[in-house]
Amino acid sequence: MPIHDWEIALFDDMVQTEFDLRVLCMCGRPPVRCTHGSQRYVMLTDALYDIEALQRIYLAQGMAEELEQLLESAANGDPGAETPNPDEPPPTEAELVSPQQGFRNQQYMAFWPLLRDVVLAEARTPLPHAFELRHLAPRMAMLAPDLFLLDEEPQAVAERVLQQLIGEGKLSHLSSDVRRRIVVVCGTPESILYVRQSVLPRWKPAMRSALVNGRRRGRKA
């Protein structure tokens, strides 16, 4: 059966960059983004958020936490924070952190909490919520592209985030459909409170519009 022109046009519209193609290969779905000029948005919890604004929020948070750890280590006399002893042999090449590994660690520290918060915010009620990993993973990839590209198993990132939250008791696991890659969970009282008091207020500077009953707030249908 020949490929129709409209199918090629649809593919060109959905897959515009190499990253789009890689996400399609990793997740089975391309990322679906909203754009306005140079700004990119993503739909989360029935609201539209500026992707770069969310990234800046979590990058700043990650840097602040890293600085706090360094200051705490120095205050506690952590040997790792002291000046190296010139009499000791220099670290071997295997002991040094490569620039790529350092960047990967930075991405993980900054954006892994963002991916966790996305899941918790989507499941912010005690009612069952079905996560289809093929839909969740592309949105995560848009929010943390470098984290995905540097991960050894990028196709499993979304599932790892979900399983981590379930293992920590932050989400109640109800059921799974392995074949369709669907995980059904519900929020716990603690996670719902965390989302309401911490996540949504933190995201507020990045929110561009909210939808109410499928309509944009403040506009007539």
Image: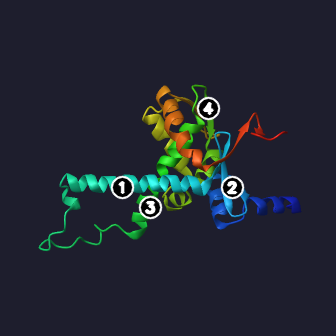
Residue 138 shows up from this direction: yes
**Number of marks present in the image shown:** 4
Cα–Cα gap, marks 2 and 1: 33 Å
Q: Which mark is residue 22?
A: none
Q: Residue at x 63, y 61 (%)?
A: 22
Residue 13 relative to residue 93: left or right: right
Cα–Cα gap, marks 4 and 1: 34 Å
Q: Position of residue 194 (x, y in %)?
A: 48, 34
Residue corresponding to mark 2: 30
Which badge, 2 or 1, is on the more N-terminal residue?
Answer: 2
Q: Residue at x 58, y 44 (%)?
A: 204
Q: Residues within 10 Å of mark 1 (few under 14, many from 20)?
A: some
Residue 159 shows up from this direction: no
The residue nearer to you, when weighing 124 against 19, is 124
Which badge, 4 or 1, is on the more N-terminal residue?
Answer: 1
Which badge, 2 or 4, is on the more N-terminal residue?
Answer: 2
- Helix, strand or loop at mark 1: helix
Q: Residue furthest left?
A: 87
Q: Which amino acid lies under the numbered mark 2 shown in the image of this protein?
A: Pro
Cα–Cα gap, marks 3 and 4: 31 Å
Residue corresponding to mark 1: 66
Residue 75 relative to residue 49: left or right: left
Q: Which amino acid lies under the numbered mark 4 shown in the image of this protein?
A: His
The quadrant of the rendering that contains the C terminus is top right
Q: Are marks 2 and 1 in contact (CB under 8 Å)?
A: no
